[in-house]
Image (cartoon, grey):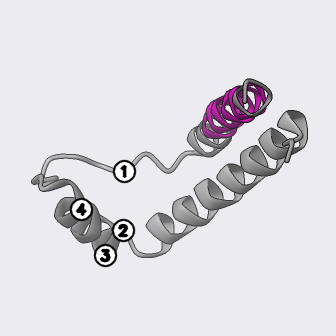
């Protein structure tokens, strides 16, 4: 089975952007719960750390996560296709 690297990368980038926006909205709506959840997940004390919920942060974060995810998944699909041909 061959993967379509561009289509898979585009789908993954879109999903990453949607998840980033959903996370941003949850943090904006429930900052205390988001802080508590993050502290438990990362085993850190975020007492002196503030959330950056600016529109620029939303746009740049969504774009960077999308681009990084898309690139990583594209590379994964290309590598997978090459490994399948090597058999």
Query: Where does residue 77 sit, x and y in percent of width and height?
Result: 74, 35
Does the magenta run of residues contain 71?
A: yes
To which residue does mark 2 refer?
A: 31
| First along the sequence among labels 1 and 2 | 2
Tell me the SS state at disc 3: helix
Query: Where does residue 76 sit, x and y in percent of width and height?
Result: 66, 33
Indicate which label's residue lies in the foreground, 1 or 4. 4
Q: Quadrant of residue 78?
A: top right
| First along the sequence among labels 4 and 3 | 3
Q: Please, is residue 8 above or below residue 18 in the view?
A: above
To which residue does mark 3 refer?
A: 33
Q: Which mark is residue 41?
A: 4
Q: Residues within 10 Å of mark 3 (few under 14, many from 20)?
A: few
Chain part drawn in magenta: 63-82
Q: Residues within 10 Å of mark 1 (few under 14, many from 20)?
A: few
Q: CA distance from mark 1 to mark 4?
A: 16 Å
Q: Residues within 10 Å of mark 4 (few under 14, many from 20)?
A: few
To which residue does mark 1 refer?
A: 51
């Amino acid at each position: 089975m061959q993967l379509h690297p561009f289509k898979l990368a585009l789908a993954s980038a879109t999903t990453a952007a949607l998840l980033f926006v959903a996370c941003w909205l949850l943090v904006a709506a429930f900052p205390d719960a988001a802080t508590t959840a993050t502290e438990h997940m990362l085993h850190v004390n975020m007492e002196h750390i503030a959330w950056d919920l600016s529109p620029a942060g939303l746009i740049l974060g969504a774009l960077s996560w999308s681009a990084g995810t898309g690139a990583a998944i594209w590379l994964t699909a290309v590598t997978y296709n090459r490994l399948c041909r090597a058999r």
